[in-house]
Image (cartoon, grey):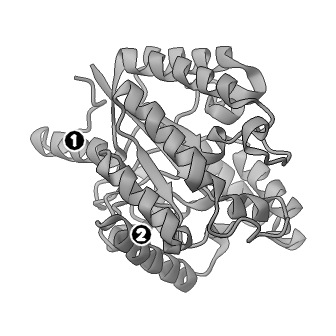
Amino acid sequence: MSYCTISVDVDSFDSLLKFHGLNKDRFGDYDPVYKKAVPRFIELFDEFGIKATFFVVGEDCLRLPNRTIIRNIVSRGHEIANHSLNHKFAFSMLPREIKMKDIVESTRIIGDASGYMPVGFRAPGYDVDEVTIDLLDKMGYLYDSSLYKFIIYPLIRRASYLRSKQILRSQMLKNLQKEIKETIVSPMHIYRPMAGKFWRKGEDRNIFEVPVSIMPFLGFPFNTTFLFLFGPKFFDLGFWLTRKYNMNLNYNFHSTDMISSDCDKIFLKHPGLNIDLLTKQSLFRRILKEITKYYKCLTLESFCQIESQSKKVSGGEGTSLDR
């Protein structure tokens, strides 16, 4: 049986409000993401015997109720990983010293909240760059999982940031052509990023990059956002292509996937919030039933540790992690 990874980006509702250009701090310590969504995901993963990776935001870990939930995640055998200090958008555009301060501080806070130091990172909005990978590697991180090989996503990301007033209009096209080129040529399998060119394979770094899964050749994501838009058949196509071409499966959920307006009384124009909870949970069970039929689901940390051992045994040659 092959190995795969499943992760959840635990973005608080305050982060989501900020993304939509709305006032944050509306929920305070009572964040529906930690109060409701995360326990629902834990229950769902327990049902299928899945060990997943939860990417948490450092500042969210300072809230006492959230820390209790985080410790529960760990006690169930899941991994806690770093999703930045405060989910600042346009992460790649930040100066190096700001990125370093963000990663150092979030690492400390998440480590204190979870009981162990995180070894994995995912940039807000999958907005990773060479500087971020370099900092993570020098800090001893085992992996990054921010690469999102959806060719038009750099443009979509900038348009979203502009709409939510996270960047200036003058920054709209900054490095856009370069990012699209890097997205096109980057690998779809787990790899060690080349020093100076994180989008290419190399052996001069210790850190791994684990790209978020997209459909081979077609290049479309088949995560839950697209599931909500196009229906379960869209997942079926992506999953079939992933298996057919023996690609790594790194499937990504968002915490808001487990929130619904019908029972949680939160009304916001955001993918999936208008779908009732039972319908969404039924869709997720359908997905996980298919995944666990063909894969054993590991945390990203365990997945990368196995790949690291495989490279040592094979003298540097990577594997597809099929067993």
Relative to the observer, which residue lies in front, 23 or 141?
Answer: 23
**Residue furthest toward the left?**
313
Q: Position of residue 153 (x, y in %)?
A: 71, 46
Which amino acid, by three-letter code, is at mark 1? Ile
In-image side of 234 versus 141 (left or right): right
User: Does residue 272 appear in this view?
Assistant: no
Q: Identity of the amino acid at label 2? A: Ile
Element type at mark 2: helix
Q: Residues within 10 Å of mark 1 (few under 14, many from 20)?
A: some
Residue 115 seen in the current view: yes
Q: Earlier in the sequence, mark 2 or mark 1?
A: 2
Q: Marks 2 and 1, Cα distance to the nearest angstrom?
A: 24 Å
The structure residue drawn at horizontal position 49% and vertical position 71%, both measured from the top left corner, is 64
Query: Compared with residue 70, is residue 62 higher up or lower down, i.e. above or below?
Result: below
Question: Which quadrant holds residue 294?
Answer: top left
Residue 244 percent location from the top left of the image: 45, 14
Q: Which mark is residue 110?
A: 2
**Quadrant in which residue 124 is drawn:** bottom right
Q: Name the secondary structure under disc 1.
A: helix
Instruction: Name the image quarter holding the C terminus.
Output: top left
Residue 270: x and y in percent read: 80, 44
Rendering quarter of residue 107: bottom left
Residue under the image location 69 percent in, 35 percent down? 225
Mark number, residue 306? 1
Task: Tell me what residue is drawn at x 85 percent, y 64 percent.
Answer: 21
Q: Residue at x 84, y 47 (%)?
A: 267
